[in-house]
Image (cartoon, grey):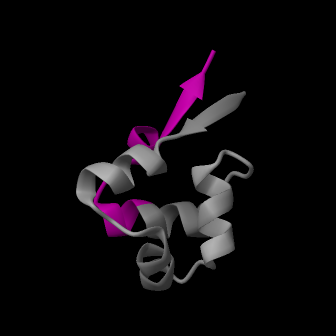
Amino acid sequence: MKYKCRLRIIFAEKEIKQKEFAEKVGISPAGISALVNNRALPSFENAYKICKELDMRLDEIWKEQE
């Protein structure tokens, strides 16, 4: 199963800077970049932190691709 990360779109809509977001959630800027560019999927812990900070559900951030 493949997932498409919507963080780039969400950050643009909410005017969030990747580096500042990375600091808030305790994930390295390189780690956030890997997620934004669909080079990696987050651990459960990191996905939870991201969802909580954005006040969004997991399926709103990572969409399943067919």
Indicate left or right for 9 with 35 as reference: left
Q: Residue at x 39, y 44 (%)?
A: 9
Q: Is residue 27 magenta?
A: no
Q: Quadrant of the C terminus?
A: top right
Q: Is residue 52 above or below residue 64?
A: below
In this view, the residue in front, 26 or 45, is 26
Indicate left or right for 46 with 40 as reference: left
Which percent across, then down, holds residue 44? 62, 61
In this view, the residue in front, 37 or 40, is 37
Q: Quadrant of the N terminus?
A: top right
In this view, the residue in front, 40 or 37, is 37
Indicate left or right for 9 with 47 as reference: left
- Stretch in magenta: 51-66
Which percent across, then down, holds residue 53? 35, 69
Which percent across, then down, holds residue 61? 44, 45
Q: Residue at x 40, y 59 (%)?
A: 51
